[in-house]
Image (cartoon, rainbow, N blue to C red):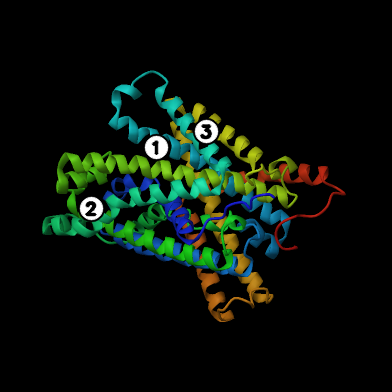
Amino acid sequence: MNKEPRQIGFWMCVALVVGNIVGGGIFLLPTSLAPFGLNSILGWLLSSAGAILLAYVFSTLVKAMPAAGGPYAYTRAAFGPLTAFLVVWGYWISIWVANAAIATAATSYLSTMFPEVFAIHGAPTCFTLFLVWFFTLVSWWGVGAVGWIQSVTTVLKLLPLIGLCLLGFFHTTRAGFVAASSVPLSLGGTTAAATLTFYALLGFESATIPDAKIRDPARTIPRATLIGAIVTTILYTLSCTVVMLLLPLGTLAQSNAPFADAARVIWGSTGASFVTLCAAISAIGCLNGWTLLQGEVPAVMAQNGVFPRVFARMSSRDTPTCALVVTSALVSLLVLTTASQSLTRVFTFMILLSTIACLVMYGVCALAMLRLNFTGKLSGVATGQGKLTLMGVLAVIYSLWAMLGAGTEAVLWGAALLAAGLPVYWLVQRGREGTPGPRRGPPS
């Protein structure tokens, strides 16, 4: 008798959401926000509201279509397979591009703790590739292994954020507040800060993608998505504010490890080393969660007939072996390519493109909720139609605003990225003429 594949429960689901949001980037973000002073607090409030609003959109959609295939299923039900493919195509690329950055960040944090080891020629690149393929193996092993690692690393990565939230304010001074308030409040400053802070909150949709592998998805995923988004935004806002008030703005703007420098003020060098270790664990845990998704996304598309059939093949452990291996190979190529310092700007720009792809997916999913609401397909959701309409419109407006905040050039390149998926879609459809329809997801 075959053993039923293991599914993850509520707390592991929360850990997946929180763990995928909290990566290594948050530990560097206060430095980027330093020039904006108190505008950054308003930016956090705006981006937090936007993240919670969009998390509500995803929680509503998964209630109506549990275990249907995540964002692909939602956009396909509203706009058909082509739109769904293009949106999720861009999202898939954004995941594996970001995974290359996350793996590199984890190596960077660890290199500050073991400089002699990582000073060996080629050691950083080799260790980055090791992380990529280790977590590929973890995801192949099964969702239970991913969930266990995610739970442990999420607890460890949240410790410095919670510690600064609880104790940091007692060490802040009036001088710190005066320095932060020396930067005048402005619409432009708040908008720029909100754009930066929202990038740190990407990932709240994580639980909707492996929905078929989550126990009682119609109940578990909406709660985990909203709780994960709310907890993370509160911790981010409070901890980054504490860091800004603890360190002089000039020092903060030049810091390579702002959270570690803030911890040094409170707990000394031991505290700084502990925060650096937590930052490395944070990036490693984030890579663990996103590696799971980098396999699930193309597998869902393949199961619905818009991606090569081989990506839909599942192992005996109910994991998409080919999708994981191919995507990790792409991550590895990107890591090897960006090992050259001359390509650093290219890599940074690709990260910005990946963020645009995420924002496109968020906005289209919000539009999908509006369309499905108007056609009565969300009637089973225990929320009034008027409320859903309001939340959907606000989510669309917020997504557009965040995209514009990234700059016109990035938006145009993002459009080119989505257009590059058209030949892939055409080739797959041409090869599938006369084959059966999709296995997973609602009909278009």
Q: How many marks?
A: 3
Q: Secondary structure at mark 3?
A: helix
Tell me which numbered mark, 2 or 1, is placed earlier along the sequence: 1
Task: Name the residue nearer the viewer: 115 or 366.
Answer: 115
Residue 253, visible in the rendered structure: no
For disc 2, the neighbor class at 10 Å (few under 14, some 14 to 19, many from 20) is many
On the rendered image, what quadrant is the C terminus found in?
bottom right
2 or 1: mark nearer the eye: 1
Relative height, residue 114 to residue 380 (above, below): above
Q: Which residue is drawn at the image coordinates 44% and 46% (left, top)? A: 149
3 or 1: mark nearer the eye: 3
Task: Name the residue nearer the viewer: 343 or 161.
Answer: 161
Tell me the CA gap for discs 3 and 2: 37 Å
| Residue at the disc numbered 1 | 105
Tell me which numbered mark, 3 or 1, is placed earlier along the sequence: 1
Q: Secondary structure at mark 2?
A: helix
Q: Which residue is drawn at the image coordinates 44% and 32% (left, top)? A: 344
Q: Which mark is residue 244?
A: 2
3 or 2: mark nearer the eye: 3
Q: Which image quadrant is residue 284 in?
A: top left
Q: Which mark is residue 133?
A: 3
Q: Which image quadrant is residue 324 in?
A: top right
Q: Is residue 243 left or right of residue 373?
A: left
The kind of residue on which mark 1 rests is Ala
